[in-house]
Image: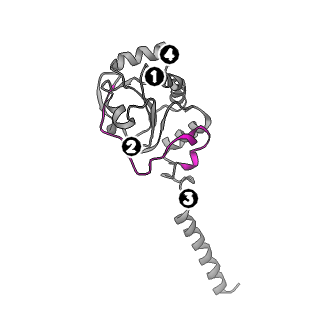
Amino acid sequence: MSKTTLMAVALVGLLAVVGFTVFKPAGTGDAGGGIEPYLVGEMAKLTVPPETQMLSDHIIMAETGEPKKLSAMKGRAMLINLWAPWCAPCRAEMKELANLQHELGDADFEVIAINVDRGGIRQAEETLKEWGIEGLGLYAEPTMAIAFDLAEGALPTSFVVDKNGEIRALFLGPLAWDKPEGLALFEALKKGEI
């Protein structure tokens, strides 16, 4: 092979590698990829916001009674769920939320199920016990402002949030979050792959 031909082959190879790196579709495995490849099966029902949305500064109460700013909870992937004891569709998905927390919950991921009824933490605890739900942290926002501001009062509403506090997807209504496609989505989210 001549020197010129060898250089031409090397140049074409280099351009192919650079072109693939620059124009590679989002979500093909690199950190920070797109969420779209994970929107299959039950997760295909999720809505992706057209513009970047970050966690709000709403104040919620933790089980300890400590107020927490929602935006200050970034640093781990989360599924934030707004629910109330009187909401039948909320009850329909609570077991799936608990299963998701049981399967993937750790320092890098948490299901944050927020009771938005006036009864607060105590009511959340009593309701989850009555429904036979175990393993979820207790959170409340008894003014319901968070539900009106973020979900126009519609319950349940859930937000898929990455470690940077960006809302990557949302859903109004109950969803089977613990299906294999849900586990794959949140596993990738907690690893920072999307």
Q: Callout 3: 10 Å neighbours few (<14), some, many (20+)?
A: few
Q: Is residue 113 above or below residue 29?
A: above
As for residue 43 lying within the magenta part, the answer is: yes
Is label 1 or label 4 in front? 1
Q: Amino acid at mark 2?
A: Gly
Q: Tell me how far mark 1 sits from mark 4, CA to CA.
A: 12 Å
Question: What residue did someone put label 1 on?
Answer: 87
Is label 3 or label 1 in front? 1
Is label 2 or label 1 in front? 1
Give the label on residue 172, or none: none
Residue 43: image location, x then y, percent: 56, 40
Is label 4 or label 2 in front? 4
Q: Callout 2: 10 Å neighbours few (<14), some, many (20+)?
A: many
Question: What residue did someone put label 3 on?
Answer: 25
Question: What residue did someone put label 2 on?
Answer: 165
Which label's residue is closer to the chain start, 4 or 2?
4
Q: Amino acid at mark 4?
A: Trp
Question: What residue did someone put label 4 on?
Answer: 131
Task: Tell me the magenta residue range.
Answer: 36-61
